[in-house]
Image (tube, rainbow, N blue to C red):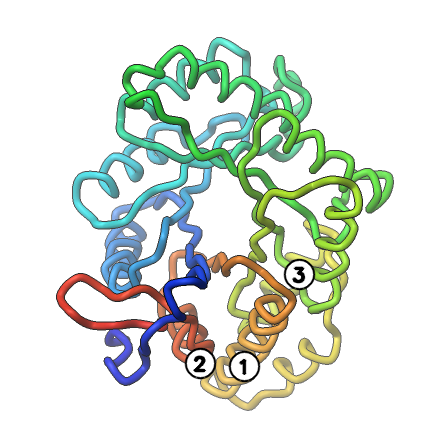
Amino acid sequence: MSPPSKSAYSVGPPASQPYPALSYELYPPRSTAAAETLWRTIRELEQTSPDYVSVTYGASGSNRDTAVELLSRLLSDSSLRPLAHLTCVGNSREYLLDLVDELITLGVRGILALRGDTPKDPSVGAGDLPYASDLVKLVREAERRRTAHLCAGRLAVGVAAYATRHPESPSFGHDIEALLAKQTAGADFAITQVFFFPDHYQRLVSAARRAGVDIPIIPGVMPLTSVRRLDRLAELAGIEMDHQLRNRLAAATDDAARRRIGVQATVNLANAALDAGAPGIHLYTFNEHAAALDVLENLQLRRPPVPGGLSRSA
């Protein structure tokens, strides 16, 4: 798919109003062919001038080398600012401190601190840090050791939030308490897991604010164009299914029709979150740019002027 035309972009809001943030999630490629596809996607996403792209990290550091390699190449060969995922389950304090130090040396200035999935292999231990809030504290500890290298600045530390109950959590209220603990530990912002209903994001933000969470909570959305992905998310992440949308996608006669239905559903979801005060949008791309760019073109998200004189609302 070619980059959206200039007509798809518009001038942003007045100077007194901040632009909505725009970010994407990518994951390290598992093969040479996947790497070629990923870099085509990266070149397309660069045209939308996102604020950052997050790079996923495998369970217990299973893809550390490929993740670090992708982060390094993003820094050296692209205009994108990477946010490095980091998980603590199954890892020691020493390993994690070493990895944060490596990321800082590499030039990474943002980390998404996550607990991570429970290891499927029973031989893998729980690790030294049981909660994401513990990992946030460790990142801040590593940051203090490298203050001089950061020009006396700070790392941007993000965490996960759940618009619906985490599958391993006893309650939605417990998730809110966990988010507050992550903020107290030093988190700067949160990105939500995927959700299917606009009121779920609004409920999350309202409950979080009542509990004292005041960091930005960015809605994470994905192009809802695949029945298989909807089913997998509902199964693995315990997310309440939008059966009406699933039925419409399943009844569509071809991929083009499914894409139109899914893109519009995603745009509606993102617009509802923005109307509710969301500070931006985080798009889960699955390393594919076409549907993500369709969402942006229809969303008309206001963006700051691009160097060279163009103005975008990609």
Q: Residue at x 31, y 23 (%)?
A: 150
Under tag 1, what secondary structure?
helix
Query: Of the residues shown, which amino acid type is indicated by label 1?
Result: Gln
Label 1: how many residues lie within 10 Å, few (<14), some (14-19) or many (20+)?
Answer: some
Residue 234 spot, x, y in % from top left: 71, 58
Marks 3 and 2, how far apart at CA: 19 Å
Under tag 2, what secondary structure?
helix
Residue 62 spot, x, y in % from top left: 46, 29
Of the pair 244 and 313, the residue shown nearer to us:
313
Q: Which residue does the numbered mark 1 point to in the structure image?
A: 264
Q: Which residue does the numbered mark 3 point to in the structure image?
A: 195
4 relative to 80, above or below: below
Query: Of the residues shown, which amino acid type is indicated by label 2?
Result: Asn
Judged from this view, the residue extending furthest toward the left is 308
Q: Residue at x 64, y 33 (%)?
A: 183
Residue 298 - label: 2
Marks 1 and 2, how far apart at CA: 8 Å
Under tag 3, what secondary structure?
loop
Query: Which quarter of the figure is the C terminus placed in?
Result: bottom left
Residue 238 spot, x, y in % from top left: 74, 52
Marks 3 and 1, how far apart at CA: 15 Å
Label 2: how many residues lie within 10 Å, few (<14), some (14-19) or many (20+)?
Answer: some
Query: Of the residues shown, which amino acid type is indicated by label 3?
Result: Phe
Q: Residue at x 66, y 61 (%)?
A: 195
Judged from this view, the residue extending furthest toward the front is 16
In this picture, residue 159 sits left or right of residue 27: right
